[in-house]
Amino acid sequence: VMNAMAAPLIEQHLPDWVEPRFFRSAEELFELAPSAEIGWFDLYQPSGMDKAIRLATKLKWLNSVYAGVDFFPLDVLRERGTILTNGTGINAITIAEYVVMGMLTVAKGYREVVRSQDRHEWLLDSPGKVELAGSRALILGYGAIGQKVERMLQGFDVEVVKVRRSAGEGTLGPDQWRAQLGTFDWVILAVPGTPETEGMIGAAEIAAMKPGSTLVNVARGSVVDQDALIAGLKAGTPGHAVLDVVTPEPLPADHPLWDVPNAHVTSHLSGRAQTKMFERSVTRFLENLRRFRAGEPLQPQVD
Ligand code: NDP
């Protein structure tokens, strides 16, 4: 089963042994789900996805275009032995570019620069005089996104420390970064939204950050205690937050976070390089179809 939006991209490439069934609404998806063996997911947080998966008792493989897996009932999939492949890496470049943009926006005071143009005002001084070179960044989550961010920051001569679940050579483990938190100018969140990462940046971590430093979140809103962050921003620690993901989404128009002057809020848009992203997903999906048919392991699988 596939969302009808995917039809023009994928239909002509599907091998003969696949019988595609496209759905246009949640109701159509619920109807098709019980007979589906392979599922293609490309709607962002659609209502009813949980119900559809519970109905899809024959589902052997679920493919998500997106990297995040927090909207799937992982326990149900695991119990049934359904393979889940996700879109990790597919939009890592565009997200990493957003992270660098956020850092440069803060370093160069670019928001103020743009506002001065809106006012037709020639500034006599620069609102941002920070150089990225020589600054220190902590990347929490060293997967597809974290690794791309590191590569880009190396070009700016930023000193990078990175953290992953399984600490290894050159990376810290989940419990090894807190003691050094106050030494970083930039804290970049690129972990998945899981029970382990929920509230990872809480009141204690916010208080331990370097005054004037910047938190960049391209992971999930759930990773940060947002109320504690708002209080911290108002007090100056951190000095700025660049937030592509927040709680809840969409952020209601009257939410206080919009008006925190040192919060840079964007609408979960850092990963939207649509055409290239879908081209990459289709290529990966077709290769996985071949592997599925041949009984070979699919890539990348979510454990
Ligand atoms: P990956 O799975 O490639 O990387 C995740 C990284 O996080 C891995 O290095 C993993 O460690 C690490 N990690 C997991 N749990 C912990 C933990 N408790 N403590 C420290 N590190 C941890 O994912 P991606 O890089 O592709 O994406 C990361 C997340 O970014 C996605 O899950 C999604 O939520 C979010 N995202 C946001 C988008 C947006 O538009 N803003 C778009 C795409 C993704 P290890 O390497 O040891 O497994």
Image (cartoon, rainbow, N blue to C red):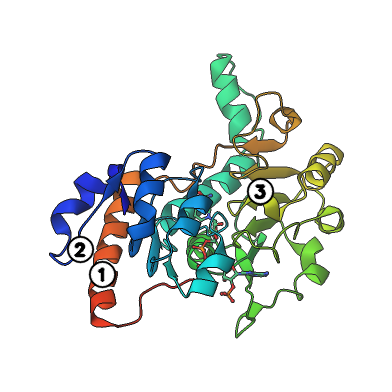
Q: Is residue 31 left or right of 225 when viewed as pictured?
A: left
> Residue at label 1?
289
Determine whether 238 is above or below 85 in the image. Answer: above
> Residue at label 3?
221
Q: Nearer the viewer, residue 211 or 249?
A: 249
Asked if the residue under mark 2 is in contact with the one under mark 3, i.e. CB atoms within 8 Å, the reply is no
Residue at (17% x, 60% y) in the render: 14
Which numbered disc, 3 or 2, marks the residue closer to the eye? Answer: 2
Q: Nearer the viewer, residue 64 or 182?
A: 64
Classify residue 17 by image quadrant. Answer: bottom left
Indicate which disc residue 206 carries.
Answer: none
Tell me the kind of residue under disc 1.
Leu
Q: CA distance from mark 1 to mark 2?
A: 9 Å
Residue 3: percent from the left, percent from the top? 33, 46
Q: CA distance from mark 3 to mark 2?
A: 37 Å
Judge the density around disc 2: few (<14), some (14-19), many (≥20) Cα neighbours within 10 Å. Answer: few
Determine whether 228 is above or below 204 in the image. Answer: above
Ligand 1, by image quadrant, is bottom right
Tell me the kind of residue under disc 2.
Val
Which numbered disc, 1 or 2, marks the residue closer to the eye? Answer: 2
Residue at (39% x, 50% y) in the render: 42
- Mark 3: secondary structure: helix
Judge the density around disc 1: few (<14), some (14-19), many (≥20) Cα neighbours within 10 Å. Answer: some
* Residue 67 in view: no
Determine whether 199 is above or below 45 in the image. Answer: below
- Mark 1: secondary structure: helix
Location of the N terminus by quadrant is bottom left
Asked if the residue under mark 2 is in contact with the one under mark 1, i.e. CB atoms within 8 Å, the reply is yes
Going from N to C along the chain, the mark reached first, 1 or 3, is 3
Residue 218: percent from the left, percent from the top? 58, 51
Tell me the kind of residue under disc 3.
Gly
> Residue at label 2?
18
